[in-house]
């Protein structure tokens, strides 16, 4: 019987892994999210359990102020954001590590100021990369399209995760 440990406190990652049918234990990693690496694909692998949002070529992490969150969300209005997330699977028996990254794009209709105000007041935007909450009831109707998958945007691409789990088991 395989035991899984999710090294992230992310609610959406727990939800996605549960949807995939896995039982797991959560052991959140204490990592420095302020590491400076310019290439988003390299950054997410270095962070190993994180997701970053790219808007106009700039990496956006979790907003820390209301003004920052407002700027992020207004920037997505009638525009798009890219998410780049990584998955790192370690087979603790064989010490085999498999890693990869996945990218998706989210295109938005105009996001009204009252929606932005409500999101900031609620506070959830401060816990996600780029303040990007595509699954939220206030923002999901404003998503024009997603290139990629919703689970990738939310931080744990199912297809990549499954592929890496299977590969790590074959290598043991």
Image (spheres, rainbow, N blue to C red):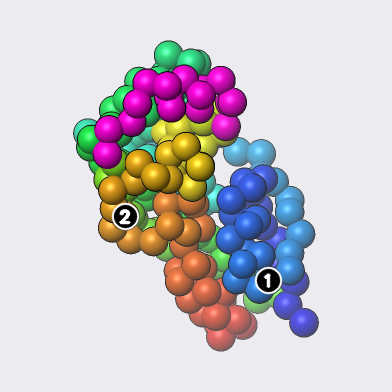
Left or right side of 46 for 143: left
Up-down: is 164 above or below 122? below
Q: Is residue 18 visible?
A: yes
- Please name the residue shown 49% across and 52% down the image: 155
Residue at left 73%, top 69%? 23
User: Is residue 81 on the magenta stretch?
Assistant: no
The CA span between labels 1 and 2 is 26 Å
The residue singled out by tag 1 in the image is: 22
Q: Position of residue 163 (x, y in %)?
A: 48, 76
In the figure, is residue 17 to the left or right of 36? right
Q: Position of residue 125 (x, y in %)?
A: 51, 31
Q: Residue at x 55, y 80 (%)?
A: 166
Q: Please indicate, yes or no, whether residue 39 appears anywhere in the rendered image.
A: no
Range shown magenta: 109-124
Quarter of the picture holding the C terminus = bottom right
Question: Which class describes the residues within 10 Å of circle 2: few (<14), some (14-19), or many (20+)?
Answer: some
Could you tell me residue 147's position as x and y percent? 28, 58
Q: Nearer the viewer, residue 14 or 160?
A: 14
Q: Nearer the viewer, residue 103 or 12?
A: 12
Question: Which residue is rendered at x = 51% and y = 24% of the image?
Answer: 118
Residue, disc 2: 146
Q: How many marks?
A: 2
- Quadrant into which the N terminus falls: bottom right
Whether residue 160 sits left or right of residue 5 in the image: it is left
Q: Residues within 10 Å of mark 1 (few under 14, many from 20)?
A: few
The rendered magenta stretch, by its main secondary structure, is classed as helix
Callout 2 secondary element: strand
Q: Nearer the viewer, mark 1 or mark 2?
A: 2
Say the numbered circle drawn on residue 171. Answer: none
Residue 35 percent across, percent down from the top left:
46, 33
Q: Return the disc, 1 or 2, that comes first in the chain's sequence.
A: 1
Depth check, front residue: 53 or 43: 53
């Amino acid at each position: 019987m395989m035991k899984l440990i999710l090294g992230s406190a992310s609610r959406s990652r727990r939800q996605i892994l549960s949807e995939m049918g896995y039982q797991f234990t959560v052991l959140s990693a204490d990592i420095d999210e302020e590491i400076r690496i310019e290439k988003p694909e390299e950054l997410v692998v270095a962070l190993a359990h994180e997701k970053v949002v790219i808007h106009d070529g700039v990496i956006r992490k979790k907003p820390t102020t209301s003004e920052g969150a407002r700027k992020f969300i207004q920037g997505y209005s009638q525009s798009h954001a890219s998410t780049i997330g990584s998955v790192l699977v370690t087979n603790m028996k064989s010490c085999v590590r498999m890693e990869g990254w996945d990218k998706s794009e989210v295109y938005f209709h105009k996001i009204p100021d009252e929606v932005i105000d409500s999101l900031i007041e609620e506070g959830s935007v401060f816990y996600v990369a780029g303040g990007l909450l595509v699954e939220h009831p206030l923002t999901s109707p404003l998503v024009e399209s997603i290139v990629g998958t919703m689970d990738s945007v939310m931080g744990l691409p199912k297809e990549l995760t499954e592929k890496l789990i299977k590969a790590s088991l074959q290598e043991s």
